[in-house]
Image (cartoon, rainbow, N blue to C red):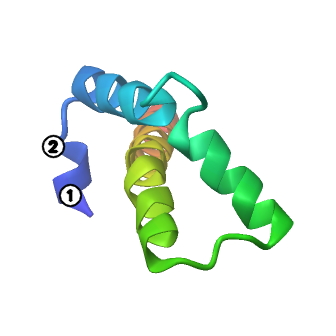
């Protein structure tokens, strides 16, 4: 998991924000795919791949921040 610590946080934030809202019109893909998932309409392989591609940077950002907080909490206890 050390590879994720090497990703620059500002770059990861930028990519996650961009992929989270792209394309802006008519509706961001991530919002559309999550809505489709909640309605049970996410069945096409292309839609599932699209959900993965748009959600992956957000998941990596969450993991990176979690690891950052975990490391900093460990340093404070010393």
Asked if disc 1 and disc 2 are in contact, CB closer than 8 Å, the reply is yes
Report the front residue among 34 and 13: 34
* Quarter of the figure that contains the N terminus: bottom left
Report the front residue among 59 and 3: 59
Query: Does residue 25 lie above or below 69 as drawn?
Result: above
Q: Residue at x 50, y 22 (%)?
A: 24
Q: Residues within 10 Å of mark 1 (few under 14, many from 20)?
A: few
- Give the residue at mark 1: 2
- Say which quarter of the image contains residue 40: bottom right
Residue lying farthest to the front in this orientation:
26
- Say which quarter of the image contains residue 28: top right
SS under mark 1: helix
Left/right placement of residue 43 relative to residue 52 reads: right
* Quarter of the figure that contains the C terminus: top left
Query: Does residue 74 lie above or below 40 as drawn?
Result: above
SS under mark 2: loop
In the rendering, which numbered label is found on residue 6?
Answer: 2
Task: List x then y, in percent, for residue 43.
Answer: 62, 79
Report the front residue among 21 and 58: 21
Task: List x then y, in percent, for residue 74.
Answer: 47, 43
Q: Residues within 10 Å of mark 2 (few under 14, many from 20)?
A: few
Q: Residue at x 50, y 44 (%)?
A: 62
Query: Does residue 11 lie above or below 70 as drawn?
Result: above
In the rendering, which numbered label is found on residue 56?
Answer: none
Left/right placement of residue 26 relative to residue 50 reads: right
């Amino acid at each position: 998991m050390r590879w994720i610590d090497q990703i620059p946080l500002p770059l990861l934030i930028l990519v996650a924000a961009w992929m989270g809202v792209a394309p802006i019109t008519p509706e961001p893909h991530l919002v559309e795919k999550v809505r489709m998932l909640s309605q049970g309409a996410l069945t096409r392989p292309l839609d599932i791949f699209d959900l993965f591609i748009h959600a992956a940077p957000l998941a990596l950002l969450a993991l990176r921040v979690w690891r950052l907080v975990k490391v900093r909490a460990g340093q404070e206890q010393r």
